[in-house]
Amino acid sequence: MDGVVIEKTSSFSVSKRVYFILKRLTDIVFALLGCILLVPIALIVKITYILNGDFNSIFFKQKRIGKNGKEFNLYKFRTMVPNAEEVLKKLLKQEKYKKEWDLNQKFSKDPRITKIGNILRKTSLDEVPQFINVLKGDMSLIGPRPLINGELDAHNGNHELYESIRPGITGWWAANGRSATTYEKRLELEYYYCKNCSIMLDIRCIFRTVKAVIFKTGAK
């Protein structure tokens, strides 16, 4: 009986290793294509911001927590006003904003988001620079969303499970409601992926993500 258990465990770990190797190779291929796509999109975004009188950098980077708790810089197109952090501090002094932020770590109607930024978010184009993170190995195409330091603790999250795999540009949460879900439900969806990640689940995730982007399901 012990021999059978060992054999099953060994077989499971080998299949998982093969899965993660294939996953990384796929990440590299699509990240290279994504970085090529990034150039013309960045040019259009820059010109659009300039035409609206905003000459600040179109890129935004923020410290996030990745696999095994490793910290890295996540890249996105900037969708908020340049002084977003200062504006946030002022907003959190108001009870209605503080309550919503403590619950979901975001606002349903964030006053810091620019008109251009709103379009980038609704089309998910703000995520395109994260192909750089994927190429570097900080992230994967599919995985739990990378969180800021302390965010998981604030919601009594499971670090060991959540940080067991590379975070992703999209994931099971993003494919199943995104911002339309509660934070508790979000963690449940992310945990589910961490426990059950596989080629078939990744394929389902991709199709659901495409559907969510096309129909703008839960995008804010």
Image: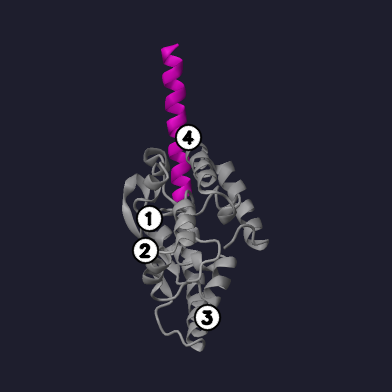
Residue at 41 percent of width and 73 percent of height = 59
Q: Which mark is residue 15?
A: 4
Cα distance in 3D space between marks 2 and 1: 8 Å
Q: Which residue is mark 1?
A: 148
Main SS, magenta region, reads helix
Q: Amino acid at mark 4?
A: Ser
Q: CB atoms at circles 4 and 3 under 8 Å apart?
A: no
Q: Which mark is residue 62?
A: 2
Q: Is residue 209 left or right of residue 149?
A: right
Q: Amino acid at mark 3?
A: Ile
Q: Is residue 202 above or below residue 122?
A: above
Report x, y in % for residue 47. Answer: 50, 85
Residue at 59 percent of width and 66 percent of height = 122
Segment tinted magenta in the rendering: 1-24
Q: Tell us which disc is closer to us: 2 or 4.
A: 2
Instruction: Using a 10 Å C-alpha cutoff, classify the residue at mark 2 as few (fewer than 14 neighbours), some (14 to 19) or many (20 or more).
Output: few
Q: Tell us which disc is closer to us: 4 or 3.
A: 3
Instruction: Using a 10 Å C-alpha cutoff, classify the residue at mark 4 as few (fewer than 14 neighbours), some (14 to 19) or many (20 or more).
Output: few
Report x, y in % for residue 78. Answer: 45, 72
Cα distance in 3D space between marks 4 and 1: 31 Å
Q: Amino acid at mark 1?
A: Ile
Residue at 60 percent of width and 49 percent of height = 176
- Give the SS element for disc 1: loop
Q: Is residue 158 left or right of residue 217?
A: left
Tell which circle, 2 or 1, labels the residue nearer the N-terminal end. Answer: 2
Q: Which mark is residue 36?
A: none
Cα distance in 3D space between marks 2 and 3: 23 Å
